[in-house]
Image (tube, rainbow, N blue to C red):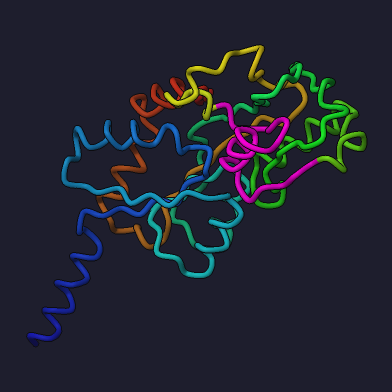
Amino acid sequence: MKKAFFALAVSAVLAFGGDVVVFAAANTTYAFSKLIKKFNQTNPDTKISLSLGASGGLTTQIQNGAPADIFMAADMGFTQKVYDAGFAVTSPVIYAQGALAIFSIRDVRLDENLSELVGLKSISIANPTTAPYGKASIEALKNANLFEKVEKNIVYTQKISETLSQALSAADVGFIAGSALFDEKMAKYKLGKNYVFVNPALYTPIDQGIVLLKRAENNAEARAFYDFILSDNAKAIFREFGYNTPK
């Protein structure tokens, strides 16, 4: 009987122990510290453990049994895949809509329709198979009738945050998440000179989706953070970092 009681106690700690594991798309990196700070104002005892990466890679980890409570992907497709496979207890909901930008520290002319990319030696783009911002980047190039002209000069990274690192070091230009431009470290870079937002008519809107995962079905704190991400308070923070948010 004591062993059974102990097992139940351990289960309760695991479910309500104050540690919520969030798997989130790399583009949310810059907004997350403020999101967690705001959430902890009303939930001070809840620890948010954050794992950031490409949405495709995070999807694979979840389907392979990774211990996550919430999944915030860079597009709805990956959250739908997780939900359809039975790993989520809520259907996908849009929490934010991302913007695509191009960034450079070189003496490169930039324009929203991407025509100035022709002739550059290296263009950094996130893997379009696993990173929705990479998929949007390729779509934009194709819709601008430029993909075949620049394809040989594309350097692929595993996730969207790495394209910024490349553009700050070796690459001539990088397709980045617009949210990265709102990080304090990026304040010295100027619109029109170092970056422009890609014409949104060139790519499908990046609807970013969230689901509550099966592991957190009875976890009140995970549910609280899930609800917070969809709240007006969180939407205001996402807008501060360049996202559009659903009404």
| Up/down of 45 relative to 10, above or below | above
Please report the bounds of the magenta region as a residue range.
154-178
- Which residue is pictured at 63% across the width and 51% down the height? 158
- Which residue is pictured at 50% across the width and 23% down the height? 186
x and y percent of residue 159 in the render? Answer: 60, 47
Q: Is residue 129 left or right of residue 22?
A: right
Magenta span contains residue 5: no
Magenta span contains residue 176: yes
| Up/down of 198 relative to 123, above or below | above
x and y percent of residue 156 in the render? Answer: 72, 47
Q: 129 or 193: which is nearer to us?
A: 193
- Which residue is pictured at 19% across the width and 40% down the height? 43
In the rendered image, the quadrant that contains the N terminus is: bottom left
Residue 10: image quadrant is bottom left
Q: Is residue 226 left or right of residue 132?
A: left
x and y percent of residue 68 in the render? Answer: 40, 59
